[in-house]
Image (cartoon, rainbow, N blue to C red):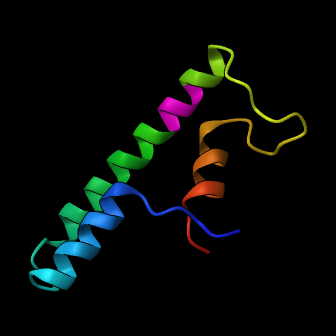
Amino acid sequence: MEKTQTAVEWLVNVVQSCIAPNFIPKEIVEQAKAMEKQQIIDSFEIGYDNGACVQEGSSIYHGGNYYNETFKKD
């Protein structure tokens, strides 16, 4: 399954290819990715806790699994 690109990943790729490869310090990129990951996990879990439908039998039962199956590159 092809993984989805996050907004932060997209922005970093655009900046690196259009402006300069090292324009954004690595520490800032990593912090932004970690913040976005936590927001995605929290959003999934809030939806799940409020009755959002998750396919029965799916291994996606909490935010961490959802993030890894949707965004994490192998």
The answer to which quarter of the image holds residue 1 is bottom right
State whether residue 55 is above or below residue 12.
Answer: above
Number of on-image labels: 0
* Residue 10 spot, x, y in % from top left: 33, 66
Q: Where 52 falls versus 34 (above or below)?
A: above
38 relative to 35 in the view: left or right:
right
Q: In the image as oriented, which residue stretches furthest toward the right?
A: 57
Q: Where is residue 29 in the image (x, y as percent from the top left)?
A: 24, 64
Q: Find out whether residue 43 is within the magenta segment.
A: yes
Q: Which residue is drawn at 60% across and 45% down?
A: 64
Q: Who is closer to the viewer here, 50 or 35?
A: 50
Which residue occupies 64% across, 46% down? Answer: 66
Between residue 68 and residue 54, name the one nearer to us. Answer: 54
Q: Is residue 26 left or right of residue 37?
A: left
The magenta segment: 41-45
| 20 to 10, vertically: above or below | below
Give x and y (percent) for residue 59: 81, 45
| Side (left or right) of 13 relative to 67 | left
In the picture, the quarter occupied by the C terminus is bottom right
